[in-house]
Image (spheres, helix red, strand yellow):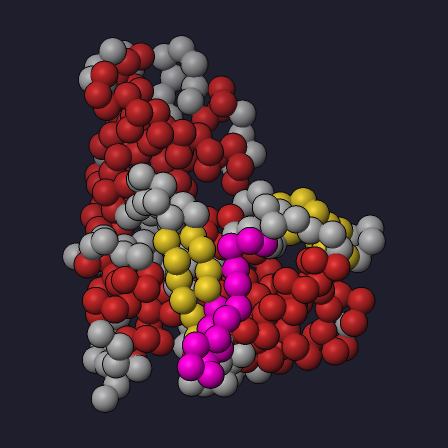
Amino acid sequence: MRVRESSQQTYASSLHRYIKFWRDVGGKHLSQILPPGTDSINTADVHLFLGWAMSRYKHNTILSTVSALINWHKDKGVTYDALTCASTRQMLNTIKAEQGPQGMPVGKTGMTKEVFRLVLGHLHNSGQLEPHMKSLFRRDATWMTLGFYGMLRRSEITAVQMQDIAVGQLNGQCFVELTIRRSKNDRRGEGAVVIITGLTRDGVRVAAREERLALCMETGACPSDPLFTTWDLDTYSLSSSPIRTPETLNKRLKSYLTSLKERYPDILVNPASYGMHSLRRSGVMAAWKAGVDVEKIKAHGRWKSDAIRAYMPGKPDT
């Protein structure tokens, strides 16, 4: 085996990334993704993966995937021209250039506070017009609000349990206390606590999301149950099943932005450019523009590197 023992895990993870794309997005079987025998991967397949990956993974992660595919070909003793040809190298160079010195994925945009408030307003109005789906809109308003002001990662949002969120008061000011049990960069599993003001400067009542908690308790939810559950189309109610993948909520956010775009054609929003991670990026942008110190933003969002600076366009307001 050409891959060293110490790199086996990285190799397997990188190879799985490519397989997962073609299995989940392209609908291919493993034999079509990694051809048996002396067949090699098609150049067009590689380019489609790169085009998809550039908005989701850092340049180094994409390079790791390409390296894994090259090693896979070497192990079979077949050529790997698709991975080293001029067109593939050009795509990799383009991705590196567009991601900039911080090497951050491109394509996922941060929304302004004004757009975010429009989304929340749209959810409120939708609940009034469609009362039978009010609990769904309330759920989505809750995870979006926590994601924006808590600068949460996608995995952190879907992992929140009932017992992880509490509302309290200090010196007459309401606040929300959110426990993060495990994060991407929390290798020891120590967890973290995020404090969010109950009423933001721009008038968003984060503490009002306790209505969602009350609704869950009414349905007999336990402290260890997930805060955000799936929507049951048969009963038009929230089920007790956890949300398995962030893509479920990604689609919800895109659908709301699409509705807003249809209603307000002049709004500078491209729904395809937004996802759950946009909320984390948006929270950083809002805090930065408000003049919050970079180190405080890093602490609030649990960053351990300066990669956060890729989310800080322009100069802060003074």
Quadrant for residue 6, please give it: top left
Residue for point 52% across, 32% down: 23
In this rendering, is residue 275 above or below 23? below
Name the foreground residue: 199 vs 68.
199
| Extent of the magenta region | 162-176
Indicate whether 108 appears above or below 28. Answer: below
Which of the image's four quarters has the N terminus? top left
Measuring from the top left, give residue 255's x and y in whole percent: 60, 64
Residue 167 on the magenta segment: yes
Identify the residue shown where x is 54% and y is 25%: 29
Question: In the figure, is residue 64 to the left or right of 114?
Answer: left
Q: Percent position (x, y) of residue 177? A: 46, 64
The residue lying toward the viewer, choosing from 243 and 296, is: 296
In this rendering, the answer to whether 256 lies above or below 36 is: below
Residue at the (26%, 35%) spot, across then down: 64
Q: Is residue 84 magenta?
A: no
